Amino acid sequence: MPSPPRVYRAPEASGGVYSCVSNYSDLMSSLAEFKKAPTYPNYLDYIGYWGIHAVCLGALWTGVTTRDLVVCAVSYFVRMFGVMVGFHRYFSHRSFKATRGMQFVLALLGTLGVQKGVLWWAAHHRFHHRYSDTEVDVHSPMQRSFLYSHCGWQLDKNNRGTDYTRVADLMKYPEIVWLNNWDLIPQAIYAALIFAFFGWSGLIWGFFISTILLWHAIHGIGSFGHRFGGYRRFATTDNSRNKWFLAILLLGEGWHNNHHFYQSSAKQGFVWWEIDVGYYILKVLSLFGVVWDLRKPPDALIRNREPALQTTMRRFGTWVQDLRRGLHRSVDDSTTGATDDEKLRLDIFKQALEARVDAFDADATNQILKDPSKLGEAEGRFRSALASEVEQLDNVSAAISAALPAALQHEVTRSLETCPFRHFLPKRAAHAV
Ligand SMILES: [Zn+2]
Ligand SMILES: [Zn+2]
């Protein structure tokens, strides 16, 4: 049996002391503790958010110099890289690999962007992709008001907590968990350093105004990236759009429709003129060996422009969402009577299944575009991935371990009967596993 992942305790209210835990019951209690949302009053979020906007008015007193503008731009650029390439492409999507040191640098630069902690960010973002623009997507402008999708959602106390089961893969790194929980410390040190080197006007421009510009550009992905204008190269199930102005502001992240179609790619500009500065920087970093395995979209992607295939791919996207829900349901149905500890373990397990569905989605899309007659191979890889996930599930009753493999395989078989590309798959009976 593989040992459970090592996770680290949240800070105690009194001392903030972390202790490494490596046994199973500690893992459970840590996750249970992590799942609780902070309970401070909600107006503090509003004061912090609008207060930082108000401080920018200090520029009326300090004035501005060319040096301030350069500090503002550099501070914006470095932190945008941290959030968009670090928090987004690396931590949320694992679209490339990085050394442990580089991973820390990415998390630190993103944390300086004052976007809450890296685990909070990644957990919410992973959910956004899995259910984009459906009724459960918390920052969809198709479901809620434009302003709420822009910035209101993150001030809503209902979204303050983090579902750590969605980011259990990131919680084995104590330095990442530390940065997540103590994000205000590096942010305060960063502001203090800017003040020490560049004085009051440097602080206003290099930290506060730069932060506001950074925030609204990034918020723009949730709002403008999912509504109004731009172009949709891919008929995804959501309403994502490619917009050049967002791509410039966000170092290549404005090609949001490309990204929603193939989220596992480290590269978001899919044709040469879709400028993707974040990816260019990753290519340079890869020369130094600190990042590698930069995932790219499939070469056959261009085939997806055929209108008939576009329509079917969109139906495939909806089908994948149904598959996700079906797998969740089949875990719930086959594990009734689970204890609280087992339920928590199964929550982590369900998120691990989500990651397997993400991988299958990318694999199957790739296969459909290249050679749909080999879709069965992607199905086979998916089935073995599910089986290996069940094998790694420990500390649950023998009844649960025995029931899950067949339940999951049966659910896949059942779902495949409605897959828009089922005619490319080998025939099998609904009861087969
Ligand atoms: Zn994303
Ligand atoms: Zn999106």
Image: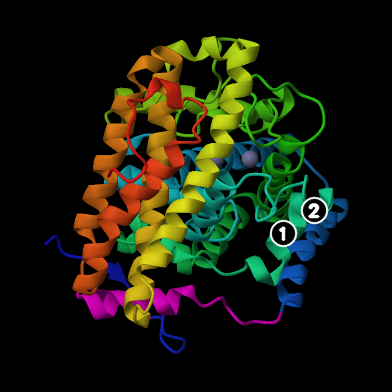
Q: Quadrant of residue 316?
A: top right
Judging from the image, what secondary structure is the residue with disc 1 in?
A: helix
Residue closest to the eye, 412 or 4: 412
Q: Is mark 1 within 8 Å of ligand 2?
A: no
**Amino acid on which the number 2 mark rests in the picture:** Arg
Q: Say which element carries label 2.
A: loop
Q: Quadrant of the C terminus?
A: top left
Residue with the mark numbered 2:
144
Report how far apart the C-alphas of labels 1 and 2 lie in the structure.
10 Å
Residue 121: image location, x then y, percent: 54, 55
Residue 404 as seen in the image, left or right of residue 113: left
Asked if labels 2 and 1 touch by Cβ distance under 8 angstroms, the answer is yes
To which residue does mark 1 refer? 153
**Which image quarter is the N terminus in?**
bottom left
Give the amino acid type for the residue marked by disc 1 in the picture.
Trp
Q: Nearer the viewer, residue 336 or 44?
A: 336
